[in-house]
Image: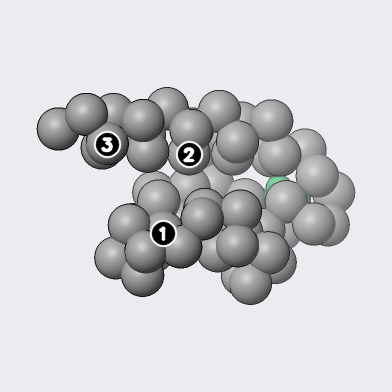
Amino acid sequence: MEKCHCAQVRFETIVQRAVSEGKDYREVVRSCGAADTCTACKDYLVAYCEERLNLAATR
Ligand code: FES
């Protein structure tokens, strides 16, 4: 799974917004309404964002 299908938001978009706006990704998730309808994407979303943001921090 690469996006929240309910909110039509790609996980990559959330990561990019978190980095560019200097926000916690969870704040971005809340503001775009992802993982808040059927919640099927939630575990994938969290794993994706944490992995990508950890990688981004070590670059
Ligand atoms: S797929 Fe993300 S809340 Fe349904």
- Image quarter of residue 16: bottom left
**Of the pair 43 and 10, the residue shown nearer to us:** 43
Q: Secondary structure at mark 3?
A: helix
Locate residue 31, reporting x and y percent: 63, 72
- Three-letter amino acid code at disc 2? Cys
Tell me the residue at 42%/27% (across/down).
51
Is the CB atom of the residue marked by disc 3 within 8 angstroms of ligand 1's nearest atom? no
| Mark 2 lies on residue | 49
Q: CA distance from mark 2 to mark 3?
A: 12 Å
Mark 3 and mark 1 lie on one chain; the one further toward the N terminus is: 1
Q: Are discs 1 and 2 less than 8 Å apart at CB?
A: yes
Q: Are marks 3 and 1 in contact (CB under 8 Å)?
A: no
Q: What residue occupies the far right of the structure in this picture?
A: 38
State whether residue 1 appears in this view.
Answer: yes
Number of numbered markers: 3
Quadrant including the C terminus = top left
Q: Amino acid at mark 3?
A: Ala
Quarter of the rendering occupied by the N terminus: top right
Question: In the rendered view, would you say 23 is above or below 15?
Answer: below
Q: Where is residue 34? Give x, y as percent.
A: 67, 58
The quadrant holding residue 57 is top left
- Among the two numbered marks 2 and 3 on one chain, the one whose residue lies closer to the N terminus: 2
Label 2: state its secondary structure: helix
Residue 8 seen anywhere in this rendered image of the structure: no
**Earlier sequence position, callout 1 versus callout 2:** 1
- Where residue 18 is drawn, which disc sits there? 1
- Residue at which label 3 appears: 57
Amino acid marked by disc 1: Ala
Instruction: Judge the density around disc 3: few (<14), some (14-19), many (≥20) Cα neighbours within 10 Å.
Output: few
Q: CA distance from mark 1 to mark 2?
A: 9 Å
Judging depth in this view, the residue of 27 and 33 nearest the camera is 27
